[in-house]
Image (spheres, coloured by chain):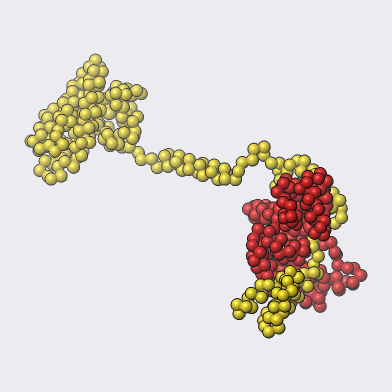
Amino acid sequence: MSREDEGRLADRLIAGDPSAFRDLMEAYKRKVYGLAYEMTQNHADAEDVSQVAFMKVHRSIGTLKPGRGLNAWLYQIVYRTAIDHIRKRSFYPKDALPSPPRAAFFSEPPDPSAGPEKSAEVACLRKRIDEALAKVSSRERAAIILRHYHDLKLREIAQTLGVSLGSAKSYLFRALRKLQKELDGAEICLNDGDRP
Amino acid sequence: MKRCRFWQKRIPEALYGEMDPETRDSLDRHLATCGKCARLYRGLAETVRLLDVRPAPDREPEFWEEYWDRFERRRAQGMDLSGTAPRAFPVPRWAYGALGATLFLALGVFLGRTLFSPRVDPGLAARPGISETSPAAQPSPATGAAGFSLEARASRYLRRSRVILLAVVNSDPGSEESFNLSLPLQKRSSEELVQEAAVLKKELRSSDRRLERLVSDLEMILLQIANLKPQPDASAVEIIKAGIESRDVFFKINLNEVRRATSGEGTERGPGRPAVNPKAPGVKTAPRA
């Protein structure tokens, strides 16, 4: 969705257009779900978080201010909902919860025409990145995910996380540094296929 | 070094194209002269490139076809994240904390009172300062003796009197600490007992003449104690001791207790309190003047 479309949708929401919320959900459901999954690392939780976040969005439309930016407003709600969910989840003993399925379903599966070796390499690399992302803190992960996969500006990331612009820059830098260290040697995947 | 730290933190801005051209030129100039920062830049750029291999997580198309319907169902039920419907009257989170703290406090008070309350010794209960804490154990003449039989009240009266008399009798007039017996306390107790004696005598007159005479004797002695000066001289105390001795007050009190114990009326005897032998050596008799 372009910035112009985003602005128009925000105006419709503020004006109380009854179909605007459905359009918002159709436009953002994958992104919202994606952020929820990245934060919770669990598909079941991601669906819960995304739906609850949309409920909160529906209730909070009145707080959307013209010109503030729909993206940051929406992602802020999703991020906070996910953090709340993680906190509640960590309150309970791990045995009381079903083990989270870690295997992600990606919108772009490895290209079968590339051959089995290449597919294995890509799968290996994705796995390494998943593991690396799981090792950074929630805020750092949110910063890199929002910047890299959701194309949010640093200013919007700062709004979403509820921090200053400088802090958002620091989170992004630290996330990249940690990922760099974790992915150091990931080129092995590109040569040897999936590691044991 | 400080310059390097400044530019290193801004590398992500450059990598994601959020840096204005002028700043970008400055960064490039720095990278051209600083090998460490240049290596870091290349490393982070490679990391960003690797992240592109992993697309954003998604679900199968069937999942999205039903997504709106599931959302609508959930919204209609008003379910929150835990899958439970919200309560009609949502309670703020601090209320749980306050309630918990109150319950904890109440439990502490209950346990403290139940397990750690001091047990009042019947002998000590005769002292007003202590007996005030347990009014049930010391009915005053004014309030009457609701719930206590006449014998029980008389027995308690005798016990309280004996404590005061023992304190006076055992005091040593020659010692400087002769009045470490807290005279104001005993004077006050004596006053109370004198008042109680009037009621007791009236009630005992028709039932137990011997006990009534004993109470009269005690009343006389207690009146003397109540009328002592705050700093009495030794002779006043000696007169009281002589009165106690001449009337055989301790013997009569102990005899009365034995009589009660043998007649099976010792319901007021405290737990573990043995029947008293009137000639028991534990009872110190007043020294002859």
* Front-most of residues B267 and A116: A116
Q: Residue at x 70, y 81 (%)?
A: B29
- Tell me the colour chain A is drawn in: red
- Quarter of the image holding residue B254? top left
The answer to whether A72 is drawn above or below residue A21 in the figure is: below
Q: Position of residue B222 (x, y in %)?
A: 18, 29
Can you name the residue that lies furthest to the top here? B206
Q: Residue at x 23, y 32 (%)?
A: B189
* Front-most of residues B276 and A74: A74
Q: Residue at x 74, y 52 (%)?
A: A66
- Quarter of the picture containing the N terminus of chain A is bottom right
According to the colouring, which chain is yellow? B
Q: Position of residue A71 (x, y in %)?
A: 75, 57
Please say whether residue A27 is visible from this viewpoint.
yes
Please say whether residue B208 is visible from this viewpoint.
no
Q: Residue at x 82, y 62 (%)?
A: A106
Q: Position of residue A127 (x, y in %)?
A: 77, 68
The answer to whether A167 is drawn above or below residue A36 in the figure is: below
- Quarter of the image holding residue A90? bottom right
Count of numbered badges drawn on the protein: 0
The answer to whether B151 is drawn above or below residue B42 in the figure is: above
Q: Position of residue B18 (x, y in %)?
A: 74, 69
